[in-house]
Amino acid sequence: MTLNAFVSDKKKLLFEDLSAGRAPREGEYSEAILKEGRVKEKPQMGTTRFEPNAVILEYIYPDKQGSSVVLPVKIASPERILFMPVPGWVVESIWQGEIDGSFHFETEAATMLAEFAKMLEAEDNQKLFGPRQATRRE
């Protein structure tokens, strides 16, 4: 199962629980936030955030007075999650929305691949989680 399929399945199952007024069938969440949300309107799906070993699914309980409540539910991941950044050689080749490859000497390409593979190691990859800013090449 892919990460996207895993997240989609969990989001749907927990949304069904919350929409029916039940507590989420799995995951860690705040009982106090759930109780506060239940007195508001029906829940809506919110954002999804990732940690190296968990997925955080957010559900929003809207309120007409503007005091919406966000219920995060933390689901353990069946395996380590990696953030795979766009390699520099791809960023350099984007032109008007088209993504293409780029040409490099074999030794340069091998070095680039080794640097990219190093970013997938646990310690290096964990640094890539959290808020990210758009990157620009000039």
Image: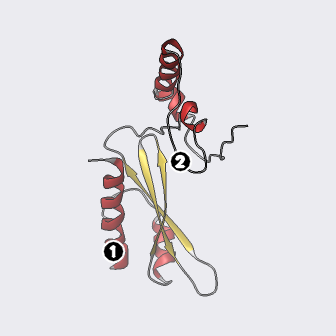
Q: Is residue 67 above or below residue 115?
A: below
Q: Is residue 123 above or below residue 91?
A: above
- In terms of sequence position, does the residue under pointer 1 or pointer 2 come before the other? 1
Residue indicated by mark 2: 98
* Residue found farthest to the top: 107
Q: Nearer the viewer, residue 20 or 84?
A: 84
Q: Nearer the viewer, residue 4 or 28?
A: 4
User: Which residue type carries mark 2?
Assistant: Glu
The image shows a total of numbered marks equal to 2
Residue at point 30%, 64% (across, down): 25
Q: Is residue 91 above or below residue 33?
A: above
Residue at point 34%, 60% (across, down): 8
Residue indicated by mark 1: 22
Percent position (x, y) of residue 99? 51, 43
Q: Quadrant of the C terminus?
A: top right
Q: Answer whether residue 24 is visible to the viewer in this image.
A: no
Q: Residues within 10 Å of mark 1 (few under 14, many from 20)?
A: few
Q: How far is the residue under mark 1 from the one under mark 2?
A: 46 Å
Q: Nearer the viewer, mark 1 or mark 2?
A: 2
User: What mark, if any, has residue 7 been given in the picture?
Assistant: none
Percent position (x, y) of residue 45? 45, 70
* Residue found farthest to the bottom: 64
Q: Nearer the viewer, residue 100 or 37?
A: 100
Q: Residues within 10 Å of mark 2 (few under 14, many from 20)?
A: few
Give the image quarter of residue 136. Answer: top right
Residue at point 37%, 74% (across, down): 18
Residue at point 53%, 30% (across, down): 102
User: Which residue type carries mark 1?
Assistant: Arg
Disc 1 on helix, strand or loop? loop
